[in-house]
Amino acid sequence: PLDLRGHLLELEHLIEQAKPARGWDWSLYRPFVELALEFDLPIVAANLSRADAMRAATQGFAAVFDEPTRRRAALDALPAALMAAHEQAVDDGHCNRMPADALPAMARAQIARDLALAEAIRPHFGRGVVLLTGNGHARTDIGVPFFLNEAERARTIAIGLLEEDNAGNDWRSRFDVAFGSPAQPREDPCASLPTRR
C-alpha cells in the first residue's frame, strides 16, 4: 500500500523547491503532481529558461540549440507562415501594442520554448507523457506539436482549455480537442500597457 503521508511530505518539499513565481497558482497543478507521485511517474521541468529564451531572441537559435537539434527541427528553414503566426500571437498577447521591430525576436523566443518542450517530452513517448502548458504552446499549428515527428504526432492529443469568450471555432480548430469554460473575472491586462508607438 502507498504511504500517502510520505508522498504528501515529498509534495510539500517539491512545492518549496519550486519557489513558484508570483501569480503562479500552485493549486491548479497540485492534483497532477499528486498523481505523478502516486504512480511513481517522472516529473520533468520542461520549459526553456528565461536566459536561454533571451539568447534565442537576440542571438538566434544556434545560441541555444546544438546543430543536430537545429537540423532535426529544420530551424534554418522555418516556414514564413509559422514566423508570421508567432509574431501575430505575440502581438495579440501584448494587446497589439508591441513595437513591430520587437516581434521577430519575441517570436524566436516562443519558437525556442516550443522546441525545448518538444525535446523535453520526446524521451518519454515510449511510456506516455503529459505536458502541462499554456494554450499557445499546445496549439497544433504553431506550438509544440509542430516539432514532433510523424510517429510522435500520431500519438499526441493537443487539448485546449478555452474561456468561452475565446472559444470560437477559429481557436477550437488549433487543437485536437478543445473545452470551453466560463470566462474568469480579471483586471484588463491591456490597461497597464503603453499604446503602440
Image (cartoon, rainbow, N blue to C red):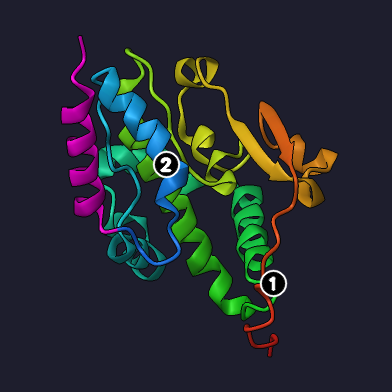
- Whether residue 90 is visible, yes or no, is yes
Instruction: Please name the residue that numbered disc 2 is placed on.
Output: 29
Instruction: Confirm whether the magenta stretch covers residue 168.
Output: no
Instruction: Please name the residue that numbered disc 1 is placed on.
Output: 95
Asked if the residues shown at circle 2 and circle 1 are in contact, with their CB atoms under 8 angstroms apart, the answer is no
- Picture coordinates of residue 103, whole percent (x, y): 57, 70
Question: Which residue is located at x 32 percent, y 58 percent?
Answer: 20
- Picture coordinates of residue 17, whole percent (x, y): 19, 52
Amino acid type indicated by mark 1:
Cys
Residue reaching furthest front? 5
Across the whole image, how many numbered discs are drawn on residues? 2
Q: Which residue is more in the foreground, 166 or 29?
A: 29
Q: Which residues are magenta?
A: 1-19
* Left or right: 80 as drawn, with respect to 48: right
Would you place residue 60 above or below residue 132 in this image?
below
Question: Which residue is located at x 75 percent, y 43 percent?
Answer: 171
Q: Which residue is more in the foreground, 41 or 34?
A: 34
Gap between marks 2 and 1, in whole Å?
Answer: 27 Å
* Marks 2 and 1, the one that precedes in the sequence: 2
